[in-house]
Image (cartoon, rainbow, N blue to C red):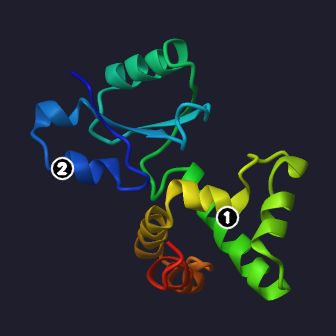
Amino acid sequence: TILATNTSGIPIADIAEALDASARERLLGLHFFNPPRWMHLLEVIPSKYTAQKYVDDVARFSDRVLGKGVVMCRDTPNFIGNRIGIGEMILTFSVTAEGGYTIEEVDTLNSKPIGRPKTGSYRLGDMVGLDVAGHVIKNLRDALSGDPSADNYDPLHDKMVISPAL
């Protein structure tokens, strides 16, 4: 039996350490992007404990049966997609405020016209959940020292989630 988590950023090794040795080697992350029914990308994240056999089996199944575009990720803070996506989200929200743009203008421009999902940044944030985005931001802030974007993390969370825009 393979054990998988769809966490958006909790280190897989941290989860594995709560398990016995036989379960640790069967645990890996499967980060489906939202909404999984339409999003092709799937991050497969083994921990330092995961046996390669399970990684290979899950990657093959995800590709052949689920039809996903599998990207192998290291067990780093927020993996690949969320690490890049949150940086883009923070920048987009900052530029919106600084430039006096409307949410509608930003979502119209930051979508299909530039080859991005038709949702745009703000609608994507709504779909994923601003509270989830806040947790992803907190994971990055707590895990990365010297991150030049760290000063932006708390204000975004406060403004969008706690204020509430949720």
Residue depicted at x 54% and y 31%: 37
Residue type at the position of mark 1: Tyr
Quote the CA–CA distance across marks 2 and 1.
36 Å
Across and down, in percent, residue 159 comes to 55, 84
Nearest the viewer among 75 and 154 is: 154
Which label is found at residue 147? none
Across and down, in percent, residue 143 comes to 42, 70
Q: Identify residue for label 2.
A: 17
Quarter-of-image position of residue 56: top left
Q: Identify residue for label 1.
A: 122
> Outermost residue, right direction?
113
Q: Is residue 135 left or right of residue 94?
A: left
Element at badge 2? loop
Quarter-of-image position of residue 152: bottom right
Residue type at the position of mark 2: Glu
- Residue 48 in sight: yes
Nearest the viewer among 141 and 89 is: 89
Element at badge 1? helix
> Outermost residue, top direction?
64
Residue depicted at x 26% and y 38%: 49
Q: Residues within 10 Å of mark 1 (few under 14, many from 20)?
A: some
Residue depicted at x 54% and y 42%: 33
Q: Is residue 3 left or right of residue 83?
A: left
Across and down, in percent, residue 72 comes to 52, 35
- Residue 84 in sight: no
Across and down, in percent, residue 121 comes to 70, 61
Quarter-of-image position of residue 53: top left
Q: Is residue 138 left or right of residue 41?
A: left
